[in-house]
Image (cartoon, rainbow, N blue to C red):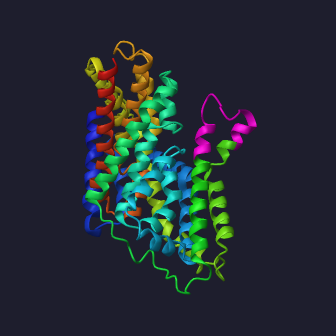
Amino acid sequence: MSLTQAAYFLAALVLLVLATGRGRVQPFIALVVAGVGFGYAAGMSTSHVGKAFGLGFGQTLNALGLTVVAAALMAEIADASGATARLRQRARGWRSQSAPLALLGLVAGLGSTPAAAFAVLDPLRRGIGGDSPRSALVLGLALSASHGLLIPAPVMLAGLTILQADWTQAVAIGLPVAVLALLLGTAFARAVASGRPDPADTARALDGETLHAPRRGALALTLVSLVLVGLLIVQSLGDIASEPLGGGSNREFLIALGRPVILLLVGTGLLLLLSGHWEPGGLTEKGWAGRALTKVAPLLLLVGAAGGLSKIAQETGMAEMNAERLLGFAPAGALALALPFALAAVIKTLQGSSLVAAITAAGMMMELVDPLGLGDPAGRTLAALAIGAGAMCVSHINDGFFWLVARGGGFTPGAALARFSLGTALQGALAIALLIAIRLLTA
């Protein structure tokens, strides 16, 4: 039954791509129909489908919605103050615009979720990369590489904690592997996506059309974006079970710093304050606030619908059942690392959550590391890293992160699958190949 459900899921994905191709069907409508249709095909009742989709929709918007709104408000302030145009003007003289975005993604991937990190960096990306498709793809793949392989990203923390792996070794091995995955992602983005700026979205001139100094606005946008990334990383540190920054109320405060409503208030308020921008009527429906909320509404609906589809997939249990089928095909020696990678990748692909994939795969591996010859400290660490690499691929329509990158790059769902989803798969394949090679050399 689980294989049949996975086949239905694949069919829903293919039908969504066909329906949204060439603008035939609006993506949100197609995603809702695909999610509900899959639920019925998988054998769920009407009440179960409705409850699961609604719950996933609400949970996803609760976790990510206000962060996306914060990014939209910041982008409008940046456009109106001239900060976006100023950054774009400066970036034209740089040898590479992909390199700073890749570096930002490598650092920001340490935050609580890659989707939140992409959202808070999106206004800055629009300036540095000219809102080009390539800039969105570079940033998305950089975040994916970092979040799956580096501490203190929650995906890595889950695998390391459950498998009782060595954190020092995880840093020593994970960092170079993440950097190589980052380089692959950047090269792939340069090969498949255009770096041409979108003039419509970087469109405020620097010659008096803005109310305040663009240079000040550009500096303010950069500083505020880095502050928000810092808050997301602090939240990740607060989630560490050993409580390195303190427990109790201190820990709750640190975790709260990365909450969406805090990111919304800090990001918008601090950018207004530092940029000195105040547009008459800016908070009205016709001002920058109204423009931002109008623009962001379709993206919020897509992110919520992705959460609804993900929840339906989780309720079927097909991800775990299909992953369990792999347990009987455990290879020997260094190739044993392919098992934790495959477990996490199957679960992630079928149900959409990287953290759930990491936790579930690590739980399945707890009793298997010794029989597979991975019970030594190095083996446990490599197994945790393999889980992290698998948990970040393949990102597609049941993942809100996918839709953020797709909208940021102006990709149709089919184009995003051929670029971002394939890019995460290639990064995962490179990472597991490197981990196996390391095991062969050190065993």
The residue that appears at 57% across and 59% down in the rendered structure is 225
Residue 199, how many percent across, how many down?
39, 77
Q: How far across and how far down the image is residue 161, in percent?
A: 52, 26
**Quarter of the image containing the N terminus?**
top left
Indicate whether residue 53 is drawn in magenta: no
Depth check, front residue: 206 or 117: 206
Q: Position of residue 157 (x, y in %)?
A: 52, 32
Does the segment drawn in magenta span residue 244? yes
Q: In the displayed structure, would residue 126 be above or below residue 118?
A: below
Q: How many marks?
A: 0
The one of 391 and 170 positioned closer to us in this rendering: 170
Residue 377, given in percent of the width and then of the height, sits at 45, 18
Which residue is the extreme one toward the top?
371
Q: Is residue 403 visible?
A: no
Residue 128 appears in which quarter of the rendering? bottom left
Tell me where the magenta segment starts and ends, as one range: 233-253
**Quadrant of the image containing the C terminus:** top left
In the displayed image of the protein, which residue is found farthest to the right?
249
Q: Is residue 392 above or below residue 405?
A: above
Q: Residue at x 38, y 73 (%)?
A: 198
Q: In screen coordinates, is 32 left or right of 212?
A: left
Of 310 and 389, nearer the camera is 389
Residue at 40% of width from left, 56% of height from top? Answer: 99
Q: Quadrant of residue 224?
A: bottom right
Would residue 302 be visible to someone looking at this image? yes
Residue 344 in the image: above or below residue 224: above
